[in-house]
Amino acid sequence: MRNLAITAATGVALSLAAPAVADVGDGPASVTLDACAQGATQSDTYLPDCSFVNLVGKDAPSYTYVTSQGPISWSGTSASGLISFPAAEQTWPALDLDNNRTLTWTPKDIAGAIDDNGTLRMAMQYEMTIDVPDGIAAGTCTLSGIVELSSEGTEFRSEQAVGQNYDPATGRFAVVSTSAYPVIPSINATCLRLAAVDYNLLKGASWYLTGSMALTEKPAVAAVRAQTAKVKLPKRIKAKGKTVLLQRAVRTNAGQKLRAKVTWSKGSAKKYARVKTTKSGKVTIITTGKAKRLRVELKLTAKATGPYEPYSKTTTWLVRR
């Protein structure tokens, strides 16, 4: 089983194993996290079906609704049940927070796996920068980390946001963190202020993301059918003289003409036999009678075509003088 791992700059690592069977084809993949909660970017109230990150608030609201000022989109690829979204193919709109603050994102690579039941697991690195324009220790604070998200379970903080397996009919999904993951602040005065006054960063961050995902479907596998033919062959071959092996060309149930190849022992030397094939497909062997024992083989073949398998039939006669 292959594994895909992401390691954050902090040294924390998450490993995702590719499922044994994936109902997803190889090709492009994309995610859109729906816009919601416009005008309510931050709140202490849980809003259903709206993506958020939860930092335990002191003087600041705990819920930050990450799509409150526009949808988030990721583009990437899927291969053998693994999905990946490189940082360069992600858009995360900046957020206007309370007290004239802003939050901007630095996208990081996201990796995941999906199984044949639509169960999703993702390892998501993140980096958010909060700008505090005024007051004590004004400046910017960068918070980063890595979180494991799953479509099974309930989000740790709200205990209400529930994961949802990927639905191939609608594309809908939801992933949650079932525990809080460490948040790593940059070392500066602004981050110290946020940790002391605004958020209890020691309690980590919890996530809920929901939206739609477009994945490449596996191409339909055509049902394989046997290629058959009705062939009438002689019971024996004359030791000396002409024997008709095929009266005319034979077609298979796929409409293909059978290719006939006749060989005989002793290196198929003309001293012992020769073969004549007409335009109509009639195949005749003329034996000379010079061999006491001669093994003659007729091989009929047709290539695979459409849903039909290749055809092959070999018949052998033992000719005695």
Image (cartoon, helix red, strand yellow):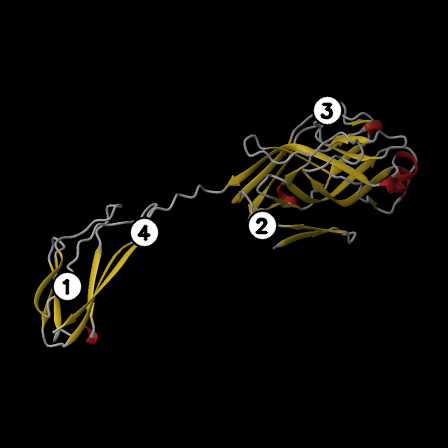
Q: Counting residues from the N terminus, which is met first, the one under dot 2 or under dot 4?
A: 2
Q: CA distance from mark 4 to mark 3?
A: 58 Å
Question: Which amino acid type is shown beneath numbered disc 4?
Answer: Ala
Q: Position of residue 136 (x, y in %)?
A: 92, 35
Q: Amino acid at mark 1?
A: Arg
Residue on which disc 3 sits:
37
Instruction: List the residue tagged with mark 1.
Output: 236
- Residue drawn at the location 65% of the way across and 29% of the way down: 34
- Upstream in the sequence, badge 3 or badge 2? 2
C-alpha separation, residue under disc 4 versus residue under disc 1:
30 Å
Horizontal and vertical percent position of residue 243: 10, 63
Direction from residue 312 to residue 241 in the image, left or right: left
Q: CA distance from mark 1 to mark 3?
A: 87 Å
Is residue 99 found left or right of 240 in the rendered image? right
Q: Which residue is mark 2?
A: 20
Depth check, front residue: 279 or 250: 250
Q: Nearer the viewer, mark 4 or mark 3?
A: 4
For discs 4 and 1, the disc positioned in front in the rendered view: 1
Instruction: Give the quadrant of residue 108.
Output: top right
Q: Is the residue 92 above or below the residue 13 in the image?
A: above
The answer to whether the residue labelled 4 contacts the one labelled 3, judged by CB atoms less than 8 Å apart, is: no
Amino acid type at circle 2 is: Ala
Q: Nearer the viewer, residue 185 or 205?
A: 205
In depth, the one of 51 and 106 nearer the eye is 51
